[in-house]
Amino acid sequence: MPTGASGGAGGQSERQRAIPPGQERRLIVAIDGPAGAGKSTTARLLAERLGYALLDTGAIYRTMALRARERGISWDDGPGVAALAEGLEIGFRLDGAVNRVFANGADVTAAIRTPEMSDGASRVSALPEVRAALLDLQRRIGGAGGVVVEGRDIGTVVFPHAEAKFFLTASTDERARRRAAELRAAGKPADEAQTRAEIVARDERDSTRAAAPLRRADDAVEIDSSALGPDQVVSKMAGLVAEIVAARARVSGGA
Ligand code: DC
């Protein structure tokens, strides 16, 4: 499977789209935020609603952690892990609600979604060599626009010129509750207190690292999803994207 994001404009009828035909501009929509804030679900639903492709950059860091583990390379070895990006082809395919991830054609969806790989991804993502090695790959996949990209540094580093930027948050308790429920739904054991501790440790590492730490871009719209369902979050986002698209259409149309 070639390198690329999931989905695209093809799967949606004109009627389903949030943006009126004729006004469309293929934007880059960035969604950043801490673990468990609901980025994956909202990014998928927003991409579906807009008829955009979907790029999950956390899955790329998870895949790097998995490759390192399989090859016996330490998660602290910057040059060693970065070298694993060479020849890496990442592909995504939406399969119902699951965004399937392929590394050089092999389906790694389940293997990268373990608590161990969450930890590994957070560790390898702190290495500057690894971040540098993955920058081009991410820009190649999402750079043409018409894409919703989720991660930690999308609005700040990967696509600082993204036309729409969101920073999605939720209380730590709520994020732990959601992540534990996700694990249980996948048939994995999940202790909420332990999940909470893992999330707190991961956020601390992700936001205090020197290289591209998790932070809200100055021009990102912050949405606290603690008391909101995914549909409510997506409606807010889609509304804002529609406003941006309409404003751009007015500017380029000279109105
Ligand atoms: O979104 P996620 O939980 O799948 O991300 C896994 C880890 O990858 C996360 O702890 C931090 C890292 N990450 C990152 O540093 N930058 C990104 N753009 C996406 C993820």
Image (tube, rainbow, N blue to C red):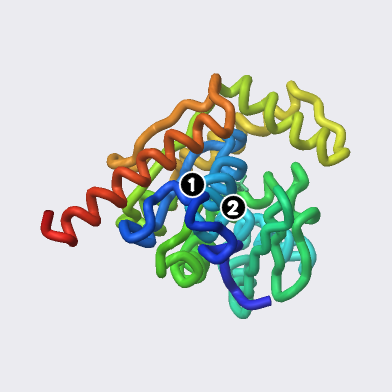
- For disc 1, the marked residue is 152
Q: Quadrant of the C terminus?
A: bottom left
Residue name at image x 55 percent, y 19 percent: 227
Residue 212 seen in this snapshot: no
Q: Report the disc number at residue 144.
A: none
Disc 2 residue lies near ligand 1 with CB under 8 A: yes
Residue 232 x/y as whole percent = 51, 30
x and y percent of residue 119 in the render? 68, 45
Q: Amino acid at mark 1?
A: Arg
Residue located 74% across and 21% down the image: 193
The residue tagged with tag 2: helix, strand or loop? helix
In this view, the residue in front, 127 or 7, is 7
| Amino acid beneath label 2 | Gly
Question: Dot 1, crowdedness within 10 Å: few (<14), some or many (≥20)?
Answer: many
Of helix, strand and loop, which one carries label 1?
A: loop
Q: Are the two marked residues, 2 and 1, in contact with CB atoms closer than 8 angstroms?
A: yes
- At 75% from the left and 26% from the top, the residue drawn is 194
Q: Which residue is mark 2?
A: 58
Q: Determine if residue 171 is in view.
A: yes
- Picture coordinates of residue 140, whole percent (x, y): 47, 72
Q: Is mark 1 within 8 Å of ligand 1?
A: yes
104 is higher (above) or lower (below) than 75:
below
Q: Earlier in the sequence, mark 2 or mark 1?
A: 2
Badge 2: residue crowd in 10 Å (few <14, some 14–19, many ≥20): many
